[in-house]
Amino acid sequence: MRHWERITSDLVKLKNTSEMMMDLAYSAVLLNNRYLAEEVQSLEEEMDSLHIEFQCRVLSRTDEEVDPRDLLGIFRMGNVTERIADAASEIAEVVLRGIEPHPILQMVIQDAEETVERVTVSEDSPVAGKSLKEARIADETGMWILYIRRGERWMKPRPNTVLLPGDAVIASGYSEGEEDLKQLLSGKSEES
């Protein structure tokens, strides 16, 4: 049974990663943000490895008393997540190639009130060691935490996710809150 739990866990990770990649890719294009586009490309490499491991795990189940046709749905789900990841990578590639956005998209970017920002949590930050619920970042800055990168691991935060020094936070919100977010997560005020 443990093997099936691992397959389930792998499939959930593939699904979550491909969804996150698509979110980051769209943000990269809309904001013409090279950092986000590079992160999508990095995640694509990780997805390729995850997908191969997943396929091998599923294929190893064919030696059991399992009809291989019963595994097709699981196998197909893994393939779908890989295709979504590939599409996200292609979207991000537009930014990395330096292709000028269409004039209408440029107007959208210029008129957008929202922005996406990447900030690293410092040891001096008053929110370091606090859960997102305790930190009340959205209330303080008007920016919402979309994703957190902790080392090589990406995560979609939950209210009980604790922010640690060194966490790279991807946040979205109104551009007026950008500086407030940087100050809060870095622990440095404008006077510093």
Image (spheres, rainbow, N blue to C red):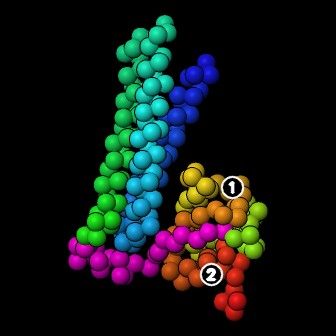
Q: Amino acid at mark 1?
A: Thr
Give the residue displayed 34% in from the left and 47% down from the top: 86
Give the residue displayed 66% in from the left and 73% down from the top: 185
Given residues 134 and 189, the one toward you in this image is: 189
Q: Give the left or right position of residue 24, taking residue 108 as reference.
A: right
Q: Is residue 30 above or below residue 90?
A: below
Q: Is residue 65 above or below residue 156?
A: above
Given residues 80 and 118, the one toward you in this image is: 118
Within 10 Å of disc 2 (Cα), the crowding (few <14, some 14-19, many 20+) is: some
Counting from the top left corner in percent of width and height, residue 71 is at: 42, 20
Q: Which mark is residue 161?
A: 1
Give the residue displayed 42% in from the left and 61% down from the top: 38
Check disc 2 and report the residue beneath it. Answer: 180
Q: Would you identify the image quadrant in which residue 95 lies?
A: bottom left
Q: Would you identify the image quadrant in which residue 99 lies?
A: bottom left
State which region is magenta.
Answer: 100-121
Give the residue displayed 40% in from the left and 55% down from the top: 41
The total of numbered circles placed on residues is 2
Counting from the top left corner in percent of width and height, residue 180 is at: 62, 81
The quadrant of the image that shows the N terminus is: top right
The quadrant of the image that shows the C terminus is: bottom right
Q: Give the left or right position of residue 169, taking residue 110 as reference.
A: right
Q: Is residue 86 above or below residue 75?
A: below
- The reply to whether the magenta stretch includes residue 115 is yes
